[in-house]
Image (spheres, rainbow, N blue to C red):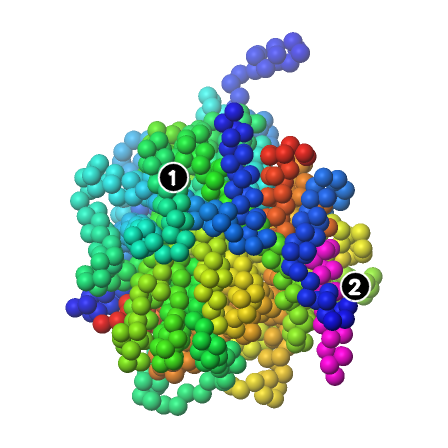
Amino acid sequence: MLLILVMVLTQGPIELAPPTDITAEDRPNDAGGNVVISWTKSADDGAGSDAVQEYLIFRAAQDEEFQQIGRTRKGGEEFVDATTQDGVEYRYLIKASDGTVHSEPGMSEVVVSSAQWFHAGRISMLVATLVISILILWFIRKAKRGEKLFIRRIAGLEAVDDAVGRATEMGKPIMYIPGILDMDDIQTIASMIILGRVARKAASYETPILVPCTRSIVMSAAQETVKEAYVDAGRPDAYDADKIRYLTDDQFGYAAGVDGLMLREKPGAIFYLGAFYAESLILAETGHSVGAIQIAGTAQPSQLPFFVTACDYTLIGEEFFAASAYLSREPLLLGSLKGQDWGKAIFIIILIIGILLVSFGFETIISLLSTGQ
Amino acid sequence: MKKQIPIIITFIAGMVMILQYFIPHRPFSDIQQLFNTWYVIIAVFAMILGLGNLLKIHAIRLQRRPKGWWYSIVLLLGFAVMFIAGMGWGIERGSLFDFLFWNTHLPMSSTMFALLAFFVASASYRAFRARTSEATLLLVSAILVMVGRVPLGNYIWDKLPLLGDWIMSYPNMAGQRAIMIGIALGVVSTSLRIILGIERTYLGGK
Amino acid sequence: MNIVERLEAIDRRIIFVLILLAVVLPLLFPIGFKIIVSEPVQGFYDAIEELAPGSVVLISSEYDPATMPEVYPMNQALTRHCFARDLRIIGMGLWPQGIPLNQASMEQAAEEYGKEYGVDYINLGYKVGGIVVISAAAENIPTTFPQDYAGRPIEEFEIMEGIKNFDNVDLIVSLSAGDPGTRQWVMIAQGRYGKKVASGVTAVSAPAFYPYLNSGQLEGLIGGMKGAAEYETLIEESGLGTQGMDAQSIAHGVIIFFIILANVFYIIGKRRKK
Amino acid sequence: MIETVGTWIAAFLTLCILSFLYKDNPFYKFAEHLFVGISAAYWAVYEYFNVLRPNLIQPLFGEGQFLFIIPLVLGIMMLTRLLARVGWVSRWPLAFIVGTYAGYNLIAYLQSNAVEQVRATLVPFIQVESWQTFFGNPGAITFLTAIAVPVVVVGVITGIIYFFFSKEHTGIFGRSARIGIWFLMIAFGASFGYTVMARISLLIGRVYFLLHDWLHVI
C-alpha cells in the first residue's frame, strides 16, 4: 500500500486531455435564446487516467471576458445555454476537470442565437393537419348545402331508440352516464350530443332521465343540454334540474354512488356513453343485475371488452363518435365524419404504398412522415 | 353576447395552441405559456364549482330530509373533518390529514376497487358468453393472454408465456393501433369543430 | 331444474367466496412460482441502467389508492433502483392522490440509501390540468411548480439549482392508472420535446400502450402487478409484486375455469334448445 | 399506538365496503358517503395547497403580479354557474378551457396517435432474416416471429377498414372489415385478460393488508 501512495504523491499534477472538436450552434426551431454546445469526451474520461469528474463551460460575448456559465457531469457531451441574447455573437470554451486540475480549454466557433418562424421538423404535421382540416371543412360545407352523404348503418344506434321505448313501456326511468372525464374531453362532448337526442326522446315519452355526473362542468353542460331537449320536445315544465346531479370527482365514490342510485331507481335502460375507466365493470355488472337494457359507447379501448361482454350493444371506439353524427344527421357531424373517412382512406393508401416502397428498400417515405422534435 | 364572446375565446385559445406548435417564434411561445398558467387556475375554480354543488345538494338534503338523509350528515362530517385537518395543520407526511388519507381515504378507495375482483369473477361465470364468433375469439384470446402472463402458465407449456407475449406485441398491438388511428381522426375533427365555433353543444342553451 | 340450469343460476356470493379462497390460501401457503422477465419490463430497466450517476429522473405519479397494489410496488422498486444508481429524483403528479404515495416510496428508499429530501429528491406536488401542466413544465418548471408539495418555495432546495425545464431532465417515468397519464406524457414530453419516456401502468391500460412501445415512443412499459414482480426480480428485491404472484396464478386459474365451465353450460343449453 | 388505531380504522372501513358483497347495507352506505365526503375534501385541500396557493395567491397577492387578476376574474365567473340567473357568465371561462384543450388535442392526437403510428407500421413486409431462422429450425415461436410483420400490417389496415363508414360492408370490402373485427376482438381479448389480472391484483393488495398489517398472520 505504501508503495502506491508514494508513487501517487511523487507524480506531477495529472495532465488531463482536453475535450475535442467543440461545436456551438443556435438551437433549431425554438423561440431564440438557446445555443446547443456539443463536444467529444476528453481522452481521460471513461478511459486513460479516467480522472475527469466534470466539464466546465465558459462563455464570452463579442470582446468580453470568458465567464463560467455551467458544468456537466462526467461523460456529458452536450450543454444547452438557455440564457443567450438573440443577435449577439458568442464564443464558448470547455475545460475538463477532476475538481481541482483543469485541462487545456477547447474553443468553439462564433455563434449567434436566433428564433425561427417555422419549426422545420414539423412540415409533415403541417401537411397532415391542413389536409385533414380542409377535408373535414369541405365536407361540412357540402353537408350544409344539403348534399346527400352516405353513412353505413350502425347497429348499436338503432338500439338507442328501442331502449328508450322499452324503458317507457316498463314504466321505468332512463339513466344516462356521460363518463367520468371533464367537459374538455372529446368523448364527454360527443356524449353530450347523444344525451341531447336521448333526452329529446325521453321528454316526448315523458320518461324521467337521470344523469349522475362526476365533473361539475359536465353537470352544467348536461343540465343545459337536457333543458334544451325538453324545450324542443315542447315540455319545458317537465325538465327537473335535480335529476342531473354532481356526485364526486373521485372515480370510485362516483361508481359507488351510481350503483346505489341504480339499485334504488331500478332504471329500465342505462346508457354508458363517454370516457370510462375501471369503474365501467362495477356499473355494467350492477346495471346487468338490475335487469336494464345497457348500451355503451366509449373510445377507451381498455374498457371496451367489458362493455362488449356485459352490454346489449357497444359502440366501439370511433363508432361512438360516428353515433353522434348518424343520430343527429346534423350537417356538421355528417360532414366531419366523411372528412375523417377520407383521412382514413389516405392513411390506408400511404400504408399500402409505403410498405411496398419500404419492402423494396426505398426508405425515404419514413423520414418524410417524421414529426421531428 | 352570450354566445359570440365564448366562441371567440375558444377560437383564440385553440389557435394559439396550434400555431405555437408550428411557430416557435417569440410572441406565440410566451402567449402559450401564459394560457397554460391561466388554464391551471381556471380549472381549479371549476373544481370549487363542483364542490359547491356537492355541498349544496347535501345541505338541501338536510333541510328536506328525504329517506336516508342522515347519510348526508356522514358525508358533510367526513368532508368537514378532512377539510379542517388539511387546511388547519397542512398536508405533509405525518400530519393529521396524511394520517386520515392513509387510514380512511386509502382503504375505502382501494377496497372499492378490490370489489371489482369479485364482480369480474361473478361476471366471468354469469355474464361473459361466447354469443357470437367475435365474442368467442375475444374469450379465447383473453384466456391465452391470462395463462401466458402468469407463472402457472409456464408449468403447463413452457412456450405459453412466449405465445402470450406474441399475442400482446403483434395482433393486439395491430388492433389497438387501428383503434387509435380511428380515434385520433375523431378527436381532430371534434377539436377542429370546437375551435372554429361550429360545435357549440358544450355551451348549452340560449 | 336440471343440474346445468341449477349450476348456471348459482348465487354470485358463492363465487365471491371461491375467489376469496383462491387469493387467501396462496398468500397463507406460498408456492413460489418462478417469474420470467418479459421484453417491455427489460426495456424499462435498461432505460434506468443507461443513465449516468447524478442524472435527473422525473417521476410523475398519476395513480391512486384504488390502483395501489399494482403501481405502488413499481413506485417502490423504481425509487430504490434510482437511488441505488445515485440518480436524482424530481417527483410530481397529475392526480392529487398520487402525491403522498410517491412521497412515501421516495422516503422509504431514501432511508435505505441515505438520500436527503431537497438534495437528492424532491416532490413538487400536484397540478390540475393534465396535458397543459406537462406543456407548461416542459417550458419552465420553476414557474409551473413555484413550491414543493408542502408549500415551501423551491429556491430553498439544492436539487432545483440548474433545473429550468425538460432540457435538464434525463428520463421521465409516468406511473399512471388512466387519463391524464402516460398518453399525455408521450404526446407532449416525447412527441414535442423528444424526451425519453418510460412508464409503469395498471394492467388495465397496458395493452393500449403496446403501439407506443412498438414505435419507440415509450422506452419501456411495466404492466400490472406481474410487471412489478418482473421489475423486482430484475433489481433483486422481492416486494409486494413478487409476494402476490402465487395468489395471482391461482386466481387466474379459477377465473379461466369459471369462463370455460359457464360457456360449456351455455353450449349444452343452446344445443338442447335446437 | 397511533399506528394500531389507524390500522383498526382502516380495517373497519375495508370490511364496511366489502360488506357490499353480501348486500347493500347501512355499513356500506355509511362508508360510501364517508368516502365521497372525505375524497371531495381531499381534492379540495390539494387543489388549494398545490394549485390555488402557489399558482394564484402567491404570485398575485404575494408578489403583486397583477396580470393574474384576469384568471382570477375568469375563475370567479366560473363560480357564477352555482347561481342559475347569472349562470351564462360562466361560459367565458368554460370556453377558454375547452378551447385550450381542443388546441392541444388536435395536434397531440394527430401526431402521436395517427401519423407516428402509420410511420411505425412502414416495415418491410418480408423480414428475410426471421424467415431464414424459421427455415433454420422450424418451431411454433420462430414461425410466429417470422409472420409478425405481415400480421401487424394486415391487422392495422383491416382494422381501419372496419371503422370506415362511407361504404356498406359488402364484397371484398366487407370481408376485410370482418378480418378487421377479428383483430379488434383479439385486442379486446388481450385487454380483457389484462383487466382481469388487474382486478385480482387489487384484491390481493387488500387481502394482504388484512392478513399482514391487521391480523399479522403472514
Residue toward you, C119 or D54: D54
Going 66% across and 75% down the picture, which residue do you hit? B131
Mark 1, Cα crowd under 10 Å, few <14 / some 14-19 / many 20+, is: many
Q: Is residue D131 above or below residue A108?
A: below
Outermost residue toward the right in this view: D137
Q: Is residue A314 left or right of residue B190?
A: right
Q: Which mark is residue D140?
A: 2
Q: Which residue in the protein does label 1 denote? A: B82
Q: Quadrant of the C terminus of chain C?
A: bottom right
Q: Which residues are magenta?
A: C251-274
Q: Is residue C96 visible?
A: no
Placement of B69 over or under D58, stated as above or below: below
Q: Position of residue A151 (x, y in %)?
A: 46, 85
Q: Main secondary structure of the magenta part?
A: helix
Q: CA distance from mark 1 to mark 2?
A: 58 Å
Q: Residue D34's x, y, as percent?
A: 43, 45
Residue A39, percent from left and from top: 47, 40
What amino acid does circle 1 point to?
A: Met
